[in-house]
Image: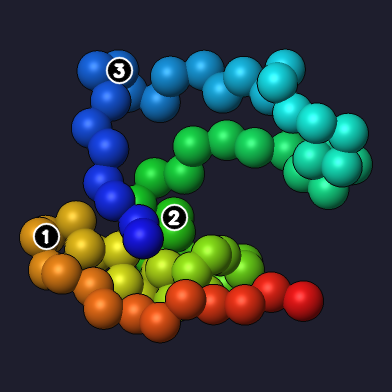
Amino acid sequence: MIVAVRLPAVAPAVDGAARVGFEAEDYYDFRWLPVSEVVASRDRFYPGRLPELLGPFLAGTEIDEPPETWS
């Protein structure tokens, strides 16, 4: 399930201090992305159709996507 969260600040600092070992190896960079950058990006996201679904989701459309399995 993916839900929207409204934060009291614009792009609060991302703190990666609580990451476990494999996360530190696998996720070497993180930052907030503007919606326009996600929509225009060709990068890989989870869910895979995030760039296509993000605008309708933020507009209040209920998204009914099956779970994705990563291997």
Q: Which residue, given by chain and number where applicable, does mark 1 sit on?
A: 59
Task: Out of 71 and 37, give the one closest to the viewer.
Answer: 71
Q: Which of the two labelled residues, at mark 1 and mark 3, occupies the earlier sequence position? A: 3
Residue drawn at the location 44% of the way across and 55% of the way down: 37
Query: Which of 70 and 51 lies nearest the eye of the viewer?
Result: 70
Q: Which mark is residue 5?
A: none
Residue 7 visible in image = yes
**Labelled pair 2, 3 in contact (Cβ < 8 Å):** no
Which amino acid type is marked by label 3?
Answer: Ala
Q: How far apart are marks 1 and 3 (CA)?
A: 20 Å
Residue 15 at what x, y percent from top left?
Answer: 62, 19
Vertical order, 4 against 16 (above or below):
below
Q: Mark 1 belongs to which amino acid? A: Ala
- Residue 48 drawn at (x, y percent): 52, 75
The answer to whether 59 is drawn above or below residue 26 in the figure is below
x and y percentages locating residue 64 in the rendered image: 26, 78
Distance (Cα) linking label 2 and label 3: 19 Å
Instruction: State which quadrant residue 65 falls in.
Output: bottom left
Numbered disc 3: secondary structure: loop
